[in-house]
Every structure is written in structure tokens, then in C-alpha cells.
Image (cartoon, helix red, strand yellow):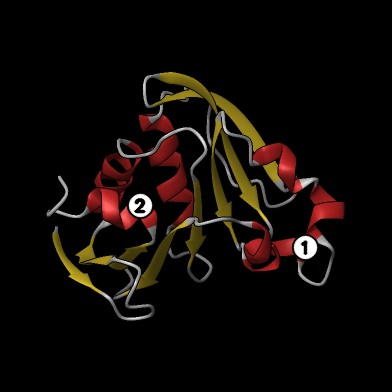
Amino acid sequence: MESRESKEDDPRLPTIEWDDLVEDDLVALAARVAGHLVPGDVVVLRGEVGAGKTTFVRAAANSLGVREAVTSPTYQFARGYEGYAGGRAVWVNHLDLYRLEGLEVRDALDLDEYLQPGSVTFVEWADPALGLLEEPGVVEISHRSPETRRVRISGPLASRLSPSTG
């Protein structure tokens, strides 16, 4: 599992990339990311259908102490689980906004309910809500082959994961 730092999109935001990850590597990376999450964090996941967004969330949530089965909330929009981050009990929220395109997100979902200081929130298909999210970490997952993925993490989360910061 190889990583490298880049500053492709916004030179002010650190970015770290991993290439040619198989599923076990993706799960290990999600667990590593979870170890750097703190209450109040929001993680946006980007990628095409089948890229591994829910696999990433499931692995991160399990590393945050979630014991329930973590599944995609596509038809429910959101699911919440009890977990731990930064040594504190938190709600681990998993939102999927795929079906909210074109709707007023705040009205449709009451998004603020999931963006509390005592929660860690993962958001798939977040485009309808991006204007409402303050400084999210962004995890982009793309297919390299049917079995491998490229993962790019940017924003505050990348700063915490950077080899130069520990």
C-alpha cells in the first residue's frame, strides 16, 4: 500500500494518494483513517457506483467500535450507530444523499441533526450538501482495475494522516 502527497486541486489543501489497493488494503486504510477521526468530523466519500465507498465506511465504522452491521443507507438516507472516537462515545452517522439531487437537502433530511459536535459523519454522494459542510475530509475512491482502487484523501483529514505530521 503506497501513499504519496500531492496538492493537485487546491494548493492550500494537503492531499494524499494511495494506488493499486485491493479490498483488504482499502479496509486497512479505512481503519487507519478512523484512528485519526475526532468528534465533529465529517468525511465526504466520492466515487462511482461500486468503487468501495460503503466498504470504506463499514471498515471505518467498525474501527470506531460500531458492532452493528453497517449497510448502505441509500433508501433511508441516513443511519446512526454508537461508536467511539478520540476516546469519547460518539454517534457514527452514515448518510447517502444519492436520491436527494435537486431537493433542498436541509428540508429533506434535517442535515444539521447529523452534523453535531458529538458525532462522526460519513456522507456518500454529498454534492447536494457540499455548501452546508464546513471543512469536510474528502475520500475519493476510483477504479484502477476490477480488483484495485486508487484512493485520494484531502482536506483536514489528509493533514492528520500526512507522514510529516505523524
**CA neighbours of label 1 inside 10 A, class few (<14), some (14 to 19), many (20+):** some
In-image side of 127 versus 29 (left or right): right
> Of the numbered discs in the image, which one, if any, rests on residue 100?
1
N-term mark: 2 or 1: 1
Q: Position of residue 137 (x, y in %)?
A: 44, 56
In-image side of 6 versus 120 (left or right): left
Residue tagged 2:
157
Q: Residue furthest front?
A: 12
91, above or below 7, in the image: above
Amino acid under disc 1: Leu
Q: Quadrant of residue 51?
A: bottom left
Q: Quadrant of residue 158?
A: bottom left
Quadrant placement of the C terminus? top left
Residue drawn at (40%, 31%) of the image: 62
Amino acid under disc 2: Leu
Residue drawn at (66%, 46%) of the image: 73
Q: Position of residue 29 (x, y in %)?
A: 26, 48
